[in-house]
């Protein structure tokens, strides 16, 4: 029973990470192409320190990959909690209920 739930949660985590990567990369790419232009006092402060008054986004792949790896390992740790509950279940008693 644990392996069935384990595979289900692994597949669910993998799909979630893939969808998250696609969404995050799309949003970052949009802000890479169309950076946020700062105005007002913040723009003056940035120009005072000789920076451009824009906030570009990064689309470097390693940023997305490392975040996906960290989330995947967190999911693997969280998957252990159902195992702790399942190992205490008496199968015969659970089927009768």
Image: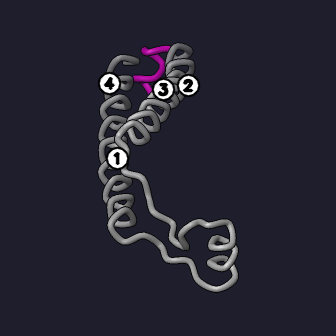
- The answer to whether residue 33 is left or right of residue 53 is left
Labels 4, 3: front one: 3
Residue at which label 1 appears: 21
The answer to which quarter of the image holds residue 9 is top left
| Residue found 69% across the figure and 74% down from its top | 45
- Is there CB contact under 8 Å for labels 4 and 3? no
How far separated are the C-alphas under marks 3 and 2?
Answer: 14 Å
Residue at which label 3 appears: 73
- Is there CB contact under 8 Å for labels 2 and 1? no
Report helix, strand or loop for mark 4: helix
For the N terminus, the image quarter is: top left
Of mark 4 and mark 3, the one earlier in the sequence is 4
Along the line of sight, the residue nearer the viewer: 60 or 24: 60
| Residue found 53% across the figure and 29% down from its top | 78
Q: Give the vertical position of 4 relative to 45 (above or below).
A: above
Labels 3, 1: front one: 1
What type of secondary structure mainly makes up the magenta span?
A: helix
* Label 2 neighbour load within 10 Å: few <14, some 14-19, many 20+: few
């Amino acid at each position: 029973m644990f392996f069935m739930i384990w595979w289900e949660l692994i597949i669910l985590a993998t799909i979630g990470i893939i969808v998250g990567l696609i969404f995050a990369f799309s949003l970052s790419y949009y802000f890479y192409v169309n950076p946020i232009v700062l105005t007002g006092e913040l723009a003056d402060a940035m120009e005072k320190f000789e920076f451009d008054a824009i906030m570009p986004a990064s689309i470097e792949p390693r940023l997305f990959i490392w975040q996906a790896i960290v989330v995947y390992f967190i999911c693997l740790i969280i998957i252990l909690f159902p195992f702790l509950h399942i190992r205490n279940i008496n199968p015969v008693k659970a089927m009768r209920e």
